[in-house]
Amino acid sequence: MSYPVDSYALGLDLGGTKIFAGLVDGAGNVLNQWRISTPTGGGGPAILKALVEAVGTITGNLSSEERDRLVGVGVSSAGHINHQTGVVEYCTPNLPGWSGTHVTEAITAAHRLPAVADNDGNCAAYGEFWVGAGRGVQNLVALTIGTGLGGGIIVDGQMVRGARGGGAEIGHTILVPAGYPCNCGQQGCIESYVSGTALAKAAERSGHWSPAPSSHQIFEWARSGDDKALGLVQDMARHLAVGMVTIINFLDPERIIVGGGVSSQGDLFMPMVREFVTELYGERGWDASNVVLAELGERAGMIGAAGQAFERYGALQRV
């Protein structure tokens, strides 16, 4: 799957601390990139203003030729995003006051550019599907494991979003009934057991260290042979494997892609996950070697957002 290589799209990945933007060509190459602080202290209106101004600043610095070749703008954001309307139906307090924001309408009104918006997990999945670890498959699930756990699902080459953009919220699948609280308001979500935050909280609950270490320290100590730290990493790997087996039973994907900050520990973590998936799923024919690391790193959401702008507003060419 490719788009005209001489056309461009602007992808913006909105996070709690920064807006990560890039000019992307039809082959998925990032030609230039920018980082802008996210003014979360000002709530939804300030965040939207910063996003709109970022589009204006970036496009204002493009040459006239580049601007003429710009097919549109894609926005990756946390929350339930209505992909058809570009409205944020719901968002957790990580982006305060963001719920109800009309993202694409504001960008188009300000800059006369067509725009599309989607959930950040969906955009990361689309990026990997387009030019990353999902190339060549039509059925995949992408998990982004960092501070929290995001997800994206592609079935038969099509993104699964649900009726209001709330589909593929894999991190908020309940893993343990009445388990640890999650910032979404539920208890026992997989995100509360599988994420950098979850690992740090597990270390704190253990009472073994004072002060409690960060998730990064836990991984480093696990590498050095600390049994307590290794046990916590193994617990998280098993919880993730349980979630993956549920995914496999529902969707039978060709590939499960793991990205986000935790993926940087993949050489330690992923063999455990694959072993647990094999143990839990049994001999029913799903090969755990199809659990793979993401390839696009922090650019996945930005590239995927640009790719969605190409998909909606650019001329699609299949090769």
Image (cartoon, rainbow, N blue to C red):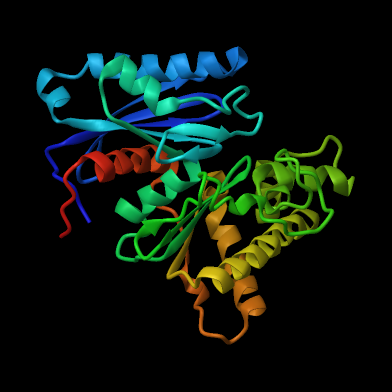
Q: Residue at x 17, y 58 (%)?
A: 318
- Give how far across and how far down residue 146 sits, in percent: 59, 43
Q: Is residue 98 visible?
A: yes
Q: Position of residue 35 (x, y in %)?
A: 41, 23
From this view, report whether residue 210 is shown above or below residue 317.
Answer: above
State which quadrant residue 29 falls in. Answer: top left
The number of callouts visible is 0
The quadrant of the picture occupied by the C terminus is: bottom left
Q: Is residue 185 left or right of residue 296?
A: right
Identify which residue is drawn at 58% across, 87% down: 283
Q: Is residue 64 left or right of residue 159?
A: left
The residue sitting at 49% across, 73% down in the picture is: 252
Question: Picture quarter containing residue 100?
Answer: top right
**Vertical order, 153 against 273 (above or below):** above
Residue 298 to residue 1: above or below: above
Quarter holding the N terminus is bottom left
Judge by depth and name the residue closer to the eye, 229 or 160.
160
Q: Is residue 214 above or below residue 133?
A: above
Where residue 91 appears, as percent x and y from the top left, is: 60, 33
User: In the rendered view, does 177 fall on the left or right side of 192?
Assistant: right
Q: Position of residue 251 (x, y in %)?
A: 51, 69
Query: What residue is at 44 percent from the left and 66 percent from the top?
Result: 255
Residue extending farthest to the right is: 207
Query: Does residue 225 appear in this view?
Result: no
Q: Nearer the viewer, residue 252 or 265?
A: 252
